[in-house]
Image (cartoon, grey):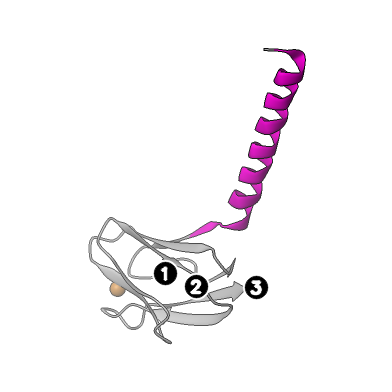
Amino acid sequence: MTRAGLRRTLLGLLVATAAWTVVSARAATVQIVIDQVAFQQPSVTVRVGDTVEWINRDVIDHTSTARDGGWNVTIPAGKSAKAVMKRAGTFEYFCKFHPNMTGKVVVRK
Ligand SMILES: [Cu+2]
């Protein structure tokens, strides 16, 4: 490879790495642990496009059900489930099986 060719290749790698960094910085995943029939983080703040992942450490199933119908996922015992936050706002959610389990996701632009 010529010196100019090598320089082009290195520059290409640099640009690709920078682009990847921007994309990965933009969309994050925020985890909420469920333990002892409770959402352990009562409130989380994310950005539009971020993913919220609920991790169920209990031996019974739960759901994360948005009061406005924005998402509804079942989180089986010992498993996890995700929902992408598509709109800005404050969204309260609960578990359909245990309605006293509640939480809140604040989604910023
Ligand atoms: Cu539940």
Task: Find residue 39 and name its label.
Answer: 1
Q: Which residue is drawn at 62% across and 57% down?
A: 26
Q: Residues within 10 Å of mark 3 (few under 14, many from 20)?
A: few
Name the dominant secondary structure of the magenta segment.
Answer: helix
Q: Where is residue 101 in the image (x, y as percent from the top left)?
A: 37, 78
Among the 4 quarters of the image, the one containing residue 48 = bottom right
The answer to whether residue 68 is above or below residue 76 is: below
Task: Find residue 109 and name its label.
Answer: 3
Q: Is mark 3 on a helix, strand or loop?
A: loop
Check disc 1 and give the amino acid type. Answer: Phe
Q: Is mark 1 on a helix, strand or loop?
A: loop
User: Of 70 and 105, which appears nearest the observer?
Assistant: 70
Q: How crowded is mark 1: few (under 14 residues within 10 Å), some or many (20 or more)?
A: many
Question: Which residues fall within the magenta stretch?
Answer: 2-30
- Of tags 3 and 1, which is closer to the observer? 3
Query: On the rendered image, what quadrant is the N terminus found in?
Result: top right
Specify whether tag 2 is near ligand 1 (CB below 8 Å): no
Q: Which residue is drawn at 72% across and 26% down?
A: 8
Q: Distance between the residues labelled 3 and 1?
A: 24 Å
Is there a contact, CB below 8 Å, between mark 1 and mark 2? yes
Q: Residue at x 39, y 76 (%)?
A: 71
Q: In which quarter of the image is ligand 1?
A: bottom left
Q: How far apart are marks 2 and 3 (CA)?
A: 21 Å
Check disc 2 and give the amino acid type. Answer: Pro
User: Of 62 and 4, which appears nearest the observer?
Assistant: 4
**Residue 104 in the figure: left or right of residue 98:** right
